[in-house]
Image (spheres, grey):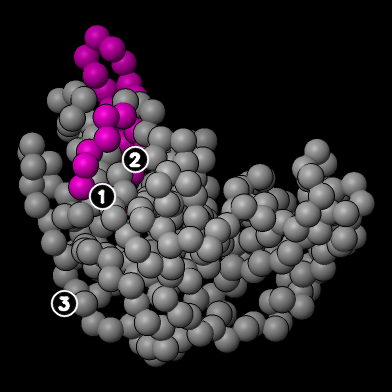
Amino acid sequence: MKAPLLSLLLLGGLWWSGTAAAQSTLANGTFEAWATQSNVEAPTQWITSDEIGAAILPLAIGGVTKSTEAHAGQFAARLTFKNISIPLVGNFPIPAVLLLGTETPLINPNNLPRTQEDILRLRPGGIPFTARPTAMQFWFKYTGTSTETGQVGLVLSKEGTIVGQTSIQLMGGVPDYRLINLPITYSATTMPDTLRIFFVAGTGATPSPTASLFVDDVTLPLTVTADRNPQLEAALVVYPNPSSNGDFSLASLQKPGVATAPFTISDAAGRIVQRQGAAPISAASGRLISLRGQPAGVYLLRLSTPEGTLTRKLLIQ
């Protein structure tokens, strides 16, 4: 069994109250249970890119493996990008994918889901689920340099219609475990019937087969108590907001890593309408974001800063 979360957890300057959160049960979110099927070892209740590859071709990918470098307990899931060579065919870059579910989807291993948009399009995996958690929390570390990137996402749906979702891009250069708290944005008041969660390592332009994403202790808090970080919130200036034409600028002169951090922007329905990686530090004095062409309304900007996740509402008039 995993040890309970500490009552106060530090993530890059943000303190999260773990013991104050009621948890929605997630089968084997601790990655303690593993089983072997078709010569592939995988965490029970989860599907891996190795299983997907074995279902299509006799490929020994080895992208998702059991690791003793756990946050707590004995095991964690280790995701590593792979270059696979197939005789007479060629080399194939294959990201490491970990999906919640038990039914292995028939997907070409060379076309595995890499982003939240892929998950929404392909709808792989998933389990029956009837709850409305406020967030998804997990512990991770990511070896390699900051050029390594991975994706994490969650989708809740009801009879195929999206009810809520959340996602984030992870970056390498994180040698020690950190806690991530991803608030879920709901677009409907209905109770979901299906839950999909995915982790992907090796989504960048030049991923390294020596860098690994470690994931452990995935939970779904039904309530979350979090202390605000006023210094982080005050560091970001968004102007003009509201915007009459969809153009916004971000500035954070005191904390350059805030305005230049990777971000996503989602609409009122929870759909991601824009995603950008980190910008040069020189852009901290005025980073342009253009939502021209998007309809008037409220949008949610989510910045993955070095000090934690920062959200800000954007209004197009």
**Mark 3 residue element:** loop
Q: Is residue 253 left or right of residue 277?
A: right
Q: Residue furthest top?
A: 88
- Residue at screen point 67% across, 52% down: 267
- In the rendered structure, find residue 37 and report the number of the disc placed on it: none
Question: Residue 208 in the image: x percent, y percent?
Answer: 40, 41
Question: Residue 160 in the image: x percent, y percent?
Answer: 42, 44
| Residue segment shown in magenta | 80-107
Q: Amino acid at mark 2?
A: Pro
Residue depth check, mark 2 versus mark 3: number of the one nearer the observer: 2
Q: Quadrant of residue 313?
A: bottom right
- In the rendered structure, find residue 124 and report the number of the disc placed on it: 2
Q: Quadrant of the C terminus?
A: bottom right
Q: Is residue 69 left or right of residue 151?
A: left
Question: Residue 293 in the image: x percent, y percent?
Answer: 80, 38
Q: Earlier in the sequence, mark 2 or mark 3?
A: 3
Q: Nearer the viewer, residue 91 or 265?
A: 265
Residue depth check, mark 3 versus mark 1: number of the one nearer the observer: 1
Please check the rendered image and state whether residue 1 is part of the magenta-colored stretch, yes or no.
Answer: no
Q: Amino acid at mark 3?
A: Met
Task: Answer few, some or many: residues within 10 Å of disc 3's Cα (few below 14, many 20 plus, some between 14 and 19).
Answer: few
- In the rendered structure, find residue 1 and report the number of the disc placed on it: 3
**Residue 186 in sight from this viewpoint:** yes
CB within 8 Å, label 2 to label 1: yes
Residue designated by label 1 = 101
**Looking at the image, is 19 positioned above or below residue 188?**
below
Q: Amino acid at mark 1?
A: Gly
Q: Earlier in the sequence, mark 2 or mark 1?
A: 1
Q: Quadrant of the N terminus?
A: bottom left
Task: Answer few, some or many: residues within 10 Å of disc 2's Cα (few below 14, many 20 plus, some between 14 and 19).
Answer: many
Question: Residue 194 in the image: x percent, y percent?
Answer: 35, 53
